[in-house]
Amino acid sequence: MTAIEGRPPSPTDTPAARGGMNGHAAPLDVATAIRTRRTIRRWTDQPVSEETVKELLECALWAPSACNMQLWDFVVVTDPATRQSLAGAVPFADKAQVCIFICYNTRFSEGSYANIQSASAAVMNMLLRAHSLGLGGFWQATIHDRQTLRQTLGLPKDVEVLSTTLFGYPAEAPGAPARRDPSHLVHWQKYHPKPTLPSSPDPRDWRLDQIADYQQARIRAGPKYNKPIKSEYEAVRGYLGHALRRVAARRVLDLLPCTGLYLEAIAGELPEAELHFVELGQQVAGFVRARLPRPAAYHPYRGTIDLPDGSVDAATCVFRLEGLPPEGRATLLREAARVLKPGGALVLAHINRGSYFEAMRLARLALGRRDVQYALATDPSLGPFTPLWADEVDRLATASGFVVEHRHSVFPLPPADEARHRVRSFHNAVTVLQYPVGALSRISRPLHGALVPAGKIRFLTLRKS
């Protein structure tokens, strides 16, 4: 009998002390477990036994907690139907065999973040023990719909979910992510000033080398940092494919693809095209290449593109101007015009500052999300970001040697999936706004054609003059 079944735990009476869950598998030593554990997002269909789940929970109970009060609640969901019902609220909940939600009563131990510290220690114990038993764990911060999660778990009003941890037998074996140099992070005896990145989300406060450093730090988040809003992704992919096919592009250059999300889409839309891209850093470029279905030539970018004049048929720039300082935008477009052949096309997508996006950004700032990561950047944009006025982009394109051939805008009102996405991390009183906002977008759809100037995403097909 284990502690979860009602008996106080004994450090000499656990499956780990007995040599593993089956009594013979030697567990990993702590140092090896720490260095070889990986975040897993793909699992097999092999069920996880109840005994194994109880072992994870018992290890969680041995974690330190504030004043040893052990005020956790662990809600374990293994039922397939329940996990499926949570798919829209908790990413990957329907894919893992076991979902463990660590909850805390908001009336206790919130001082000095004691509740968060206690839950975090419990999670780490579970992740390391799971790894030692051959399981793959995913410590996940994202909850898309807290209200649905609360209702599904039947949580009382004063109980909050602090952490989501998913487990199963891994169907992938990701390599070790790059680790930062300890000398950049560690301060002995007292804090010593080190070079820091700007905390402002305004691109005017950033240099290209700082943007590159920030992107490399964020890329370490996982093998595919890919959290697009579905409606947004489909609209962008559709326009890119249509525009590039219409200009019969055979050699395409993507400008600063960042995570490679839309370069991957271009590869799918134009399976015969020769792909090139420019990026700010080697690590980010490697990240882009790893997700593409076929090779693409990488060109480092520090304000110039190492391609000959007139050497590409078409270029694409998706939500990248918004992340550059003003002079960087002009430089990038001039370089794009240079490498395009005469009459070549630049297909550009940007966020319209004259849309609801700007109001949502300001509201998010007012509610406390003021750092770079939460600048409401179009996903997945890594770094500073600001929406741009339509006439500002048009003037910039003209000054760079382009003629506007075609304009198109979408989303004068936020679709339901964006409304859900934008409020997912706020308090319940805010998250409920997703429902009327999404409904308004559906009801008003017949009027969207008349609201084109207010569309959130603005597309341009530009021709080299």
Image (cartoon, rainbow, N blue to C red):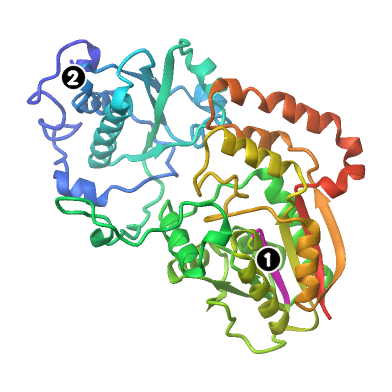
**Residue 325's image quarter?**
bottom right
Residue denoted by label 1: 317
Residue denoted by label 2: 68
- 300 to the left or right of 411: left
Q: Position of residue 445 (x, y in %)?
A: 86, 36
Magenta stretch contains residue 315:
yes
Q: What residue is drawn where x is 35% and y is 57%?
A: 177
Within 10 Å of disc 1 (Cα), the crowding (few <14, some 14-19, many 20+) is many
Q: Main secondary structure of the magenta part?
A: strand
**Which sits in the foreground, 230 or 46?**
230
Q: What residue is drawn where x is 37% and y is 35%?
A: 167
Instruction: Check disc 2 and give the amino acid type.
Output: Asn
Magenta stretch contains residue 411:
no
Q: Secondary structure at mark 1?
A: strand
**Residue segment shown in magenta:** 314-319
Q: Earlier in the sequence, mark 1 or mark 2?
A: 2
In this rendering, is residue 282 above or below 354?
below
Q: Which quadrant, please, contains the C terminus?
A: bottom right
In space, the residues marked 1 and 2 are separated at their CA atoms by: 54 Å
Q: Secondary structure at mark 2?
A: helix
Q: Position of residue 402 (x, y in %)?
A: 80, 75
Q: What residue is drawn where x is 59% and y is 20%?
A: 429
